[in-house]
Amino acid sequence: MSDEEHHFESKADAGASKTYPQQAGTIRKNGYIVIKNRPCKVVEVSTSKTGKHGHAKCHFVGIDIFNGKKLEDIVPSSHNCDVPHVTRTDYQLIDISEDGFVSLLTENGNTKDDLRLPTDENLLTQIKDGFAEGKDLVVTVMSSMGEEQICALKDIGPK
């Protein structure tokens, strides 16, 4: 055996994958699935039994969690599907810039300035109106597969 030390250079990030595999037959309604490289929330699942030697197939209907588009996929139930890691984080809203970006306060006291205002008109007006009135607003940011978007709003009282 050699006494040399081996040095490995890692070019990967922290090893956190954007998705994890899960058997298609175990994915249920209201779960998440990757369809056409987009993270989707499953709104409908139907399983079809096929012929003598065929595989049972799962038909998924999902809604993209970021742009709301409806996507469909059919996968053999014994095969693995990619399931996205979806996280929700609450941040306090500090400021809204003229160019449509928000400034958020993180848990550890830093600011996060790389998020745009949501495209959903209803949520957008709620955030702008609440901020104009000087309310203390907490926004919920959903992140998955390298994308982030504001998906909810909470009012925690006046400043």
Image: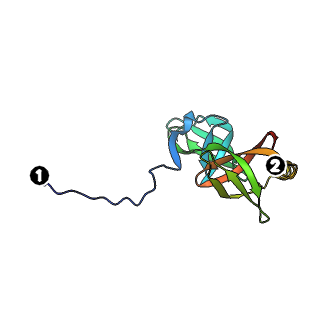
Residue 45 is situated, as x and y percent measured from the top left of the image, at: 66, 37
Depth check: give the residue in front, 16 or 126: 126
Residue 136 is situated, as x and y percent measured from the top left of the image, at: 79, 44
Answer yes or no: is residue 25 visible: yes
* Whole-number angstrom distance, CA of label 1 to CA of label 2: 64 Å
Neighbour tally class for label 2: few under 14, some 14-19, many 20 plus, Cα within 10 Å: some
Q: Kindly identify which residue carries mark 2.
A: 123
Figure check: 28 above or below 64: above
Figure check: 156 above or below 127: above
Amino acid type at circle 1 is: Met
Residue 1 disc label: 1
Answer yes or no: is residue 68 visible: no
Q: Element under label 1?
A: loop
Depth check: give the residue in front, 28 or 135: 135
Instruction: Tell me if label 1 and label 2 are in contact, CB under 8 Å.
Output: no
User: Measuring 73% from the left and 57% from the top, which residue is drawn there?
Assistant: 102
